Amino acid sequence: MHPENQTGARFPELVEIMRRLLAPDGCPWDREQTLSSLRSYLLEEAHEVLEAIDRDDIAGHRDELGDLLFQIVFQAALRARQGCFGIDDVCASIADKMRRRHPHVFGDLRVRDSAEVLQNWERLKAQEHARAGQVRRTLDGVPVGLPALLRAQRLGEKAAAVGFDWPDIQGIRDKVDEELRELDQAIAAQDPTAIEHEIGDLLFTLTRLSARLGVAPEDALRAANARFERRFRALEDQVLSDGKDLRTMTLQEMDVYWQQAKARTCPSPAQKIGAP
């Protein structure tokens, strides 16, 4: 069946496999797991999905999504054993939420662009919490456990959704210069606490600049990490091929190899778009 025509007909098969694994005569390892013990696996599988996307590994992406989906089914099954909720409740919860939060698709609401969609999303979310008697603050809902760069981006987006943001990109760019000047002052004062403070402010401001430019800072940094690793490995391979040792080379000598590695691994302008 063509991928676009698939309807999730095999999802019950996965649920049944999980049920069998947790049965009294099922898998001893699976039966020993708890929500706490599965935490690291959930994070690991999510990161492996991201790595498959970065590599544009189609088969790997499919397989890693399966591993991530299995973690969701696994946790729902553990909650079902506690009598809390089951996998159908999970599916119903997200399906109901998506219909509620997309009145421009499933209702009569008209929107101009994606920015208005996000504004409506936050407004609807606030209304839902108000009806439930919950006090929802602007920055609520951003997990503390997120990578710091991604969490900074989400916090900035939450504040911007209520209008707490620079009016234009130039304003953010000017703020970057301001933070750099303050970092220079902290460095000149040799104040470690102030240096850490100013670097944090600079990184936070850069996440807002990235977002306003349409770039996810976490993705940008991950791509930069990949570029550095690829180029440094190429540098080291050439150094070893020439019978040399990095530890005995000068910085100037290493820079020659770095420029050569950079030239060999740098993609063409067309390839740069969307790729590290």
Image: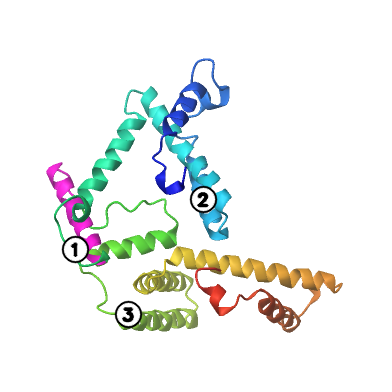
> Which element carries disc 1, helix, strand or loop?
loop
Q: Give the main secondary structure, helix, strand or loop, of the magenta stretch.
A: helix
Q: What residue type is labelled 2?
A: Val
Q: Name the residue under label 2.
A: 49
| Mark 1 surroundings: few (<14), some (14-19) or many (≥20) residues within 10 A | few
Residue at 49% from the left image edge and 71% from the top image edge:
192
Q: Where is residue 93 in the image (x, y as percent from the top left)?
A: 28, 38
Mark 2 or 1, nearer chain start: 2
| Mark 3 surroundings: few (<14), some (14-19) or many (≥20) residues within 10 A | some
Question: Magenta span has 23?
Answer: no
Residue reaching furthest to the top = 25
In the rendered structure, are the residues bearing label 3 and label 1 in contact, judged by CB atoms less than 8 Å apart?
no
59 versus 28 height, above or below? below
User: Could you give the CA–CA distance between mark 2 and mark 1, rounded to whole angstroms?
Assistant: 32 Å
24 versus 32 height, above or below? above
Mark 3 or 1, nearer chain start: 1
Magenta-colored span: 115-135
Residue at 50% from the left image edge and 29% from the top image edge:
33
Q: Mark 1 points at which residue?
A: 111
User: Could you give the CA–CA distance between mark 3 and mark 2, rounded to whole angstroms?
Assistant: 32 Å
In the rendered structure, are the residues bearing label 2 and label 1 in contact, judged by CB atoms less than 8 Å apart?
no
Q: Which of marks 2 and 1 is in front?
A: 1
Q: Nearer the viewer, mark 3 or mark 2?
A: 2
Residue reaching furthest to the front = 1
Q: Mark 3 points at which residue?
A: 169
| Residue 188 horizontal side relative to residue 97, left or right | right
User: Could you give the CA–CA distance between mark 3 and mark 1, rounded to whole angstroms?
Assistant: 24 Å
Q: What residue type is labelled 1?
A: Val
